[in-house]
Image: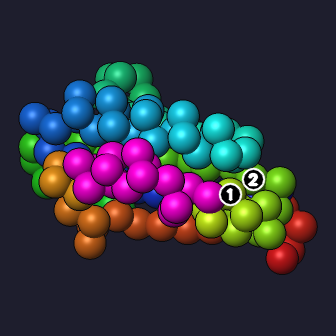
Amino acid sequence: MYTNIYFYFIHNENVTSFIDIKSRMADIMLGYGALEDEIYHTSNKVVHKKSRQLLTLLRPKPKEEVMLGQTMFRNKSHFEEVMLKVNADKEFAELNEQFSKIINRKKIIVGAFSSDGS
């Protein structure tokens, strides 16, 4: 398995728009073959409490919410295959433009992990 994770820092006023845009982007990713594309957030008080150490490391601003995105693929070549299609998709490009208007891309923390060492 190959997975990409993303930590997003979203201003509170943009959370609903973020979730809507990411949901539509996820549908496109899944349509092109991604195995999973999910967003997780810490707005639930129990989850927020259990995430305190991580949030301390990430240091969001007072009016920011941290969300975790995860997209899964069979392997790295599957990821590359899916992304070629996604990056050529006009609707995805439009959503990506909307996404850029509500989030600071420079603050996104990205990691890629593989279960097979590749």
**Residue at 62% of width from left, 58% of height from top?**
85
Could you say whether the residue bearing mark 1 is in a helix, strand or loop?
helix
**Residue at 35% of width from left, 23% of height from top?**
44
Between 93 and 72, the one nearer to me in the picture: 93
The reply to whether residue 5 is in sight is no
* Disc marking residue 70: none
Q: Is residue 96 left or right of residue 116?
A: left
Residue 41: percent from left, percent from top:
39, 35
Residue 103: percent from left, percent from top:
21, 54
In the rendered view of the protein, which quadrant contains the C terminus? bottom right
Stretch in magenta: 85-99
Q: Quadrant of residue 111?
A: bottom right
Most frequent secondary structure within the magenta stretch: helix
Q: CA distance from mark 2 to mark 1?
A: 9 Å
- Residue position for label 2: 73
Is 12 placed above or below 8 here?
Answer: above
- Residue position for label 1: 82
Q: Callout 1, which amino acid?
A: Val
The reply to whether residue 112 is in sight is yes
Q: Are the residues tagged 2 and 1 within 8 Å (C-beta)?
A: yes
**Residue neighbourhood size for the residue with mark 2, other residues' Cα within 10 Å, grouped as few (<14), some (14–19), many (≥20):** many
For marks 2 and 1, give the one nearer the viewer: 1
Residue 3: percent from left, percent from top:
68, 57
